[in-house]
Image (cartoon, helix red, strand yellow):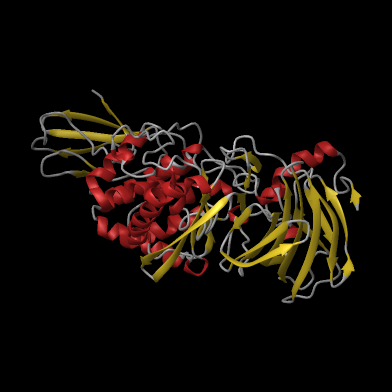
Amino acid sequence: MVCAYAFFRNATEYCKKKDSLVGSITAERAWWNILHYNLTVEPDWVHKKLKGIQTITYEVLQNRPIKEMQIDLVAPLAIDSVIQDGKSVAFRQVGDIWYLQLNKQRQSSKKQVTIYYAGKPIESLHAPWDGGMVWSKDSLGRPWISVACQYKGASLWFPCKNHLSDEPENGATISVIVPDSLIAVSNGRLIHQQQLAADKTLFRWQVKSPINHYGISFYIGKYVHLSGKHNGKNGLLSTDFWVLDYNRQKAIEHLMPQIDSTLVALENCFGPYPFYNDGFKMVDAPYIGMEHQSAIAYGSSYRKGTNVKGGDISNTGWGKKTDRILVHETAHEWFGNSITASDIADRWIQEGFVGLAEELVIAHYWGEDAGNAFMQGRFRTIENDKPVIGKYGINEDGSQDNYVKGWAVMHMIKTMLSNNNRFIQLLRKLNREFFHHVVTSREVEAFFIRETKLQLKPFFDQYLRSAQVPILQYVIKDNQIKYRFVNCNSGFTMPLKTNITGKEWIYPTASWKTVPIKGLIQGNSFQVDTNFYIQTEQTN
């Protein structure tokens, strides 16, 4: 192994380019496509260490590819050795990037490379937000181990192509070796369990569907297994719950019925659950939650509410009707796992639609007005600190508004359509069109522009690529209303529903318009439907 900054003049130059090395499709990434990950790991809870073997099956995309393969693995984890075709492969390290110096690869051929690695992985101190290994204890002081790595990626704990644009088409096999007093749970279905020497047990799990790198995870603890069946759109779906032994009764009384009712609502809104082959699984986790595909992390309080204390962040009361963490993470199976943003800068695709799912589940059971009220209660939490969409190619997340403002974008489109059934049909079609795909924001935007026939391009640019909140200025005089948008892009336009008698919808732009009015519904105060995220300002 050569451990050096060979491609760079010095460490400072490397640091300047580090973000693009992680966040872009480099030449050393572009020539190969992941087909399958076969990962074996053995965590050491006492010393907080990890050792593992990763076999990557891949397809060669280019006829004369560059000779090096970029593999991402974050220090202090380190690659020990690499094998291909029974021979050792030379490699070199450049920070958290490892370049495997492979022999010539023939286009369209399918190859395997096996990587042995070990070390002390970065520990997450505020999971799931900071990312890394979680070395924890349950309430009885027993080992409880997991990993969460959405923002920084799976290279925090295993060697991979740490880019959202490439998912292994044939899924992944995850084997976890643990002391035989513990249980290891991972994605997909348990296909093998083997007693090893030295009082250890191997648990092998297999997910057959494409899976994003941060969606791969594992959990180790004193788990018990509960199983059920959900009568879903595509037939019977196996539902499994791996919970700490002392949470068994809570899971029976809360998780199992809540998951069943949530899946009913989400399948109605988004279409069939996307991973019938891999089943549905929820696992007790030592952090609040994460959308690990077919192995959802649940770390909430086993009660309804928008937080672990059972509160309601919307201040409407509707947030206490469901277990938000359960709904939110389950909805990520559709948006985040089946439909995945190809760059983290577009994470609103995942979080915005999942926020919408929270609203739609409430609306499914308690009516549209309840769902709308819950959404409107969340408008006040939008910060507008920076645009929702971040910078591409450098692994940069956008604003945390990608949750609620991204949600607001879809909520306003629903309002503009004035037809909830049509909106639900569009969501189902979106999931069919992008089933198990990685997508860009532009592709999702184009879908809604095409399907709704609304003038949505300036709308998306305003709410996703700007932090400005449009202001509707208006003047009412002599039975006329004059209006325009300010604090917005020059081309911004959006139809608004108002309380103008006989002419409820107006069509403001950045230029003044004047229309006659006969009166106002609900008194003399001009109002815009509260389902629109704008500000209003009466002028002279």
Front-most of 226 and 350? Answer: 226
What residue is rendered at 72% in x and 69% in y?
57
In this rendered view, identify the residue nearer to me: 451 or 424: 424
Residue 114 placement: quadrant: bottom right
User: In terms of depth relative to the viewer, which is nearer, 455 or 16?
Assistant: 16
Q: Where is residue 386 in the image (x, y as percent from the top left)?
A: 51, 34
Q: Can residue 495 be seen in this view?
A: yes
Residue 162: x and y in percent read 68, 53
How many numbered circles does the render carry? 0
Residue ID at (18%, 31%): 526
From the viewer's side, name the closer residue of 375 and 216. 216
Task: Give left or right: position of 474 versus 233.
Answer: left
Q: Is residue 44 above or below residue 400?
A: below
Q: In this view, does 523 lie above or below 153?
A: above
The quarter of the picture where the C terminus appears is top left
Residue 332 x, y percent position in the rendering? 47, 53
Identify the residue at the far left of this view.
518
Give the residue displayed 71% in from the left and 69% down from the top. Answer: 58
